[in-house]
Image (tube, rainbow, N blue to C red):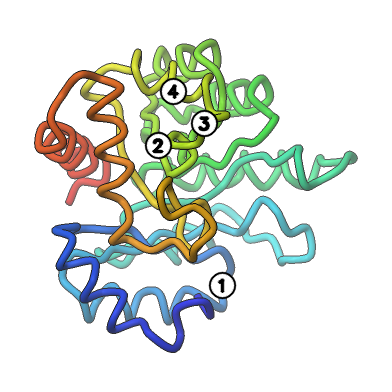
Amino acid sequence: MPQFANDQAEVLERMKSAQVTKAVVVATEEAEIAPVLTLARENDGLYAAFAVSPQDEALPDLTEEEIVLRVQDPKMVAVGETGLDYHYCQEPLDWQRNRFATHIRAANLANKPLIIHSREAACDTLDILKANGAQNCGFVLHCFCGDWDFAKKALDLGGYLSFSGIVTFRSAQDIQEVARKAPDDRIFIETDSPYLAPVPLRGKRNEPSFVPHVAQFLAQLRGKSIEDIAALTMQNANRFFRI
């Protein structure tokens, strides 16, 4: 990402200092695949994922077979992020729904799990996940920002939930309810860097070293120690991404 072009080495060093040992770096268009894979190959604990962004209609679509070819590298651990965004994108959105369905089918063919982006599109997200067999390859709702009803239906499909800095925001009551109720074996933590820095760093450029603030907040919500949250979310991520 260009936001990290000038201090990438320092960001990775701070990540290690914060005891964040693994991260997935996402390529959202074909041009990003090579640099993301290079970064993952050159750094232990970094992994890659790829899908065509659901937020940019202008990006060229790929066939299922083309996506499968692009995620074959062992360092490519997921297809994503893919999904629906009804906040920034306006109807007609058949292109977005079709792109999403293609990514799900490709993930099944590639035997890779899905990283799902869903914003203000809960019902359609669930419908497309079910219709295209996402429960077979596995999926995580990344940067979860829905309510318990959405979360419960996703969990019933076998999905995982990943919590970002949003969960620490005072206004995020629905997300905090989900973060309290979700089962221990279905939750991750993430940054969504460079966006959504957690309290008390809100407004800054987000980076992996900030993720312990999310872990600490989840620990308080769930009545656990930060060490417990770190251990169980790492175990879940390792199992999901098969790393």
Secondary element under disc 3, as helix, strand or loop, is loop
In the image, residue 50 above or below residue 150:
below
Q: Amino acid at mark 4?
A: Gln
In the drawing, what numbered circle is on residue 126? none
Are the residues tagged 3 and 2 within 8 Å (C-beta)? Answer: no
Whichever of callouts 1 and 4 sits on the residue coming sooner in the sequence is 1
Looking at the rendered image, the disc whose residue lies closer to the viewer, 4 or 3, is 3
Residue lying at the far bottom in this picture: please name it.
6
Whichever of callouts 1 and 2 sits on the residue coming sooner in the sequence is 1
Whichever of callouts 2 and 4 sits on the residue coming sooner in the sequence is 2
Secondary element under disc 1, as helix, strand or loop, is helix
Structural distance between the alpha carbons of marks 4 and 3:
9 Å
In the drawing, what numbered circle is on residue 170? 3
Looking at the rendered image, the disc whose residue lies closer to the viewer, 1 or 4, is 4
Judging by the rendered image, the residue that carries numbered circle 2 is 163
Looking at the rendered image, the disc whose residue lies closer to the viewer, 3 or 1, is 3
Q: Amino acid at mark 2?
A: Phe
In the drawing, what numbered circle is on residue 176? 4
Q: In this rendered view, identify the residue nearer to me: 145 or 240.
A: 145
